[in-house]
Image: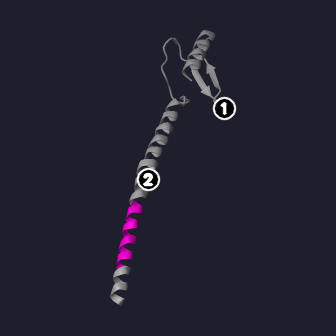
């Protein structure tokens, strides 16, 4: 065996190693694409859905059934404090809050 055979064998081994590396990288990309991407999309969807379910604790809303203005203040523990001109409006607002929150 001459030194030419050794060089040819070494070149063949390097070519096989590069081919193996390329195949391995393709497998890794497939794993990432078909596993992690759908998982990330699923987690993002769950997060957005849960954000939608959160009640609204600030802002103004117009509610049916109320004749006068009723103010509702939520303290830091999200306990509603209802301020109305009469007891009927306060009870009605409390019932509406109970259904919407």
Which quadrant of the view contains residue 24?
Answer: bottom left
Residue visible at 50% across and 38% down in the picture: 47
67 w.r.t. 42: above or below: above
Mark nearer the N terminus (2 vs 1):
2
Task: Name the element at disc 2.
Answer: helix
- Locate the C terminus by quadrant: top right
Which quadrant of the view contains residue 100?
Answer: top right
List x then y, in percent, for residue 77: 66, 32
Task: Name the element at disc 1.
Answer: loop
What are the residue bounds of the magenta stretch? 11-25
Q: Nearer the viewer, residue 14 or 58?
A: 14
List x then y, in percent, for residue 38: 44, 44
| Label 1: how many Cα within 10 Å (few below 14, some 14–19, many 20+) | few
Residue 24 included in the magenta stretch of the image: yes
Q: Chief secondary structure of the magenta span? A: helix
List x then y, in percent, for residue 39: 47, 44
Q: Nearer the viewer, residue 84 or 2?
A: 2
Per the model, the C-alpha gap separating discs 2 and 1 is: 42 Å
Q: Where does label 2 land, which residue?
A: 32
Residue 31 included in the magenta stretch of the image: no
List x then y, in percent, for residue 17: 40, 71
Looking at the image, residue 20 sits to the left or right of residue 53; the answer is left
| Label 2: how many Cα within 10 Å (few below 14, some 14–19, many 20+) | few
74 w.r.t. 23: above or below: above
99 w.r.t. 73: above or below: above
For discs 2 and 1, the disc positioned in front in the rendered view: 2
Q: Where does label 1 land, which residue?
A: 77
């Amino acid at each position: 065996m001459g030194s030419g055979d050794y060089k040819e064998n070494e070149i063949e081994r390097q070519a096989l190693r590069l081919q193996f590396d390329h195949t391995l990288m393709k497998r890794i990309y497939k794993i990432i694409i078909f596993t992690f991407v759908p998982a990330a999309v699923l987690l993002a969807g769950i997060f957005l859905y849960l954000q939608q379910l959160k009640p609204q604790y600030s802002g103004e809303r117009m509610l049916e059934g109320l004749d006068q203005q009723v103010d509702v203040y939520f303290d830091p523990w999200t306990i509603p404090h209802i301020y109305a001109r009469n007891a009927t409006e306060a009870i009605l607002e409390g019932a509406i809050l109970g259904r919407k929150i």
